[in-house]
């Protein structure tokens, strides 16, 4: 059987950058390998550097004729807001063969709640702190599942390879300084802890155990700059916004493993209902594959990338943001062919402290986890 040589690296990275949804490649999302690793459909994908996203080209504004909308964020020192979030990355690879298609797939899910606090706000910008208050991580391969919820605490019966990185991520105070132009000035507190120094008096001693690493796929700097962006700014002119406004952003995202993606984001300020402004985004994707010996030759066969954002104009904060990306690629390297499919979704939802309390959703039961067979069936 032809080996599965490609993961979902390119597809997971390309349009996530465009909509602000940066989905880390499988090697980033996976926990450190256990002594008995979860079976996988094929060999591990080699880590691929995160693509460089060029600055967007100037926007082409088409003014609307509807009512004016105030899209300015409103900052008051001491204010807090909580958001429930979920990131889901599901991919499937199929290899044609004499005995039919061979299929392998994986699913990566993270969900939790984060707290945002306004530390300072002045004419130079704002300073915010972010804290992940709860986090549940799940990695599935076929019917094999590994998951951990920070609410499990120190129950040794529930510890696994996700325990340490989840616990290291939850509760960290991340400080973000943002200028008046909406661009990040600095990010602190999300770094991995440095490895402990070796004892110079014991040169023959075993290297000290490194501290648990934080989940960069959740709180890494690229994630904060892209995935968390609507939590501190909007990619839209605040002055004179009107219902019906349309604007287009173009970006170029190189992927060193497969080629270059040219993205055109079509945005529209659709409506204002009960103080909630709604913005919708549709993304056109054009792909230029790598050319040469030994590289992956890929062709984008279909893409469906959308985003939807709700902004509370009275509070001046994000109410809800979601993105959805479905892509298909035909890929070939050294005579081996694959059909790749991926579905990538991101959701942020403002947590209303005055809403009726919901019954906490129990963590997924590994024995009942569905096999990630078809991206269209993943929710």
Image (spheres, rainbow, N blue to C red):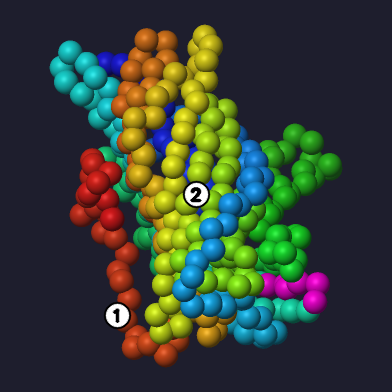
Residue at horizontal 77%, vertical 43%? Answer: 198
The Cα atoms of the two marked residues, 1 and 2, are separated by: 38 Å
84 magenta-colored: no
Q: Main secondary structure of the magenta part?
A: strand
Look at discs 1 and 2 and give the one toward the viewer. Answer: 2
The residue carrying mark 2 is: 265
Q: Position of residue 60 (x, y in %)?
A: 58, 52
124 magenta-colored: yes
Span shown in magenta: 123-128
The residue carrying mark 1 is: 359
Q: Earlier in the sequence, mark 1 or mark 2?
A: 2
Looking at the rendering, in which quadrant would you find the N terminus?
A: top left
Within-10-Å neighbours for mark 1: few <14, some 14–19, many 20+: few
Q: Are marks 1 and 2 in contact (CB under 8 Å)?
A: no
Position of residue 338 in the picture relative to residue 218 (left or right): left
Position of residue 106 in the picture relative to residue 52 (left or right): left
Position of residue 174 in the picture relative to residue 244 (left or right): right
Q: Position of residue 75 (x, y in %)?
A: 66, 81
Q: Nearer the viewer, residue 206 or 3?
A: 3
Within-10-Å neighbours for mark 2: few <14, some 14–19, many 20+: many
**Quadrant in which residue 228 is drawn:** bottom right
Q: Looking at the image, is 202 positioned above or below residue 59? A: above
């Amino acid at each position: 059987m032809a080996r599965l040589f490609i993961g979902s690296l390119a597809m997971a990275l390309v349009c996530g950058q465009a909509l602000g949804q940066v989905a880390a490649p499988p090697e980033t999302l996976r926990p450190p390998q256990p002594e008995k690793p979860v079976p996988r459909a094929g060999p591990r994908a080699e880590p691929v550097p995160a693509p460089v996203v060029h600055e967007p080209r100037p926007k082409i504004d088409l003014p609307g004729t509807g009512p004016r909308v105030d899209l300015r964020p409103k900052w008051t020192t001491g204010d807090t807001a909580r958001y429930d979030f979920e990131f889901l990355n599901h991919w499937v690879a199929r290899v044609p063969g004499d005995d039919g298609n061979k299929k392998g797939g994986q699913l990566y899910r993270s969900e939790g709640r984060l707290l945002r606090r306004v530390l300072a706000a002045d004419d130079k910008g704002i300073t915010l702190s972010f804290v992940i208050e709860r986090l549940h991580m799940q990695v599935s391969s076929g019917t094999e599942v590994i998951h951990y919820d920070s609410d499990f605490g120190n129950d040794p019966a529930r510890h696994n390879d996700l325990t340490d990185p989840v616990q290291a991520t939850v509760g960290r105070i991340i400080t973000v300084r943002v200028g008046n132009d909406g661009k990040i000035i600095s990010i602190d507190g999300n770094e991995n802890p440095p490895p402990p120094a070796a004892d110079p008096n014991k040169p023959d001693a075993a290297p000290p155990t490194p501290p648990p690493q934080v989940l960069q796929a959740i709180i890494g700097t690229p994630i904060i700059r892209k995935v968390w962006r609507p939590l501190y700014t909007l990619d839209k002119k605040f002055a004179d916004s009107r219902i019906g406004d349309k604007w287009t952003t173009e970006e170029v995202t190189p992927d060193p493993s497969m080629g270059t993606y040219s993205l055109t984001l079509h945005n529209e300020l659709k409506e204002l209902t009960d103080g909630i402004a709604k913005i919708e985004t549709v993304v056109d994707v054009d792909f230029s594959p790598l050319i040469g010996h030994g590289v992956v030759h890929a062709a984008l066969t279909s893409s469906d990338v959308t985003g939807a954002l709700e902004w509370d104009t009275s509070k001046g904060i994000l109410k809800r943001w979601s993105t959805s990306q479905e892509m298909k690629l035909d890929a070939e390297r050294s005579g081996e062919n694959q059909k790749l499919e991926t579905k990538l979704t991101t959701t942020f939802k403002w947590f209303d402290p005055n809403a009726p309390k919901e019954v906490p959703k129990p963590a997924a039961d590994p024995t009942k986890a569905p096999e990630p067979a078809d991206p269209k069936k993943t929710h």
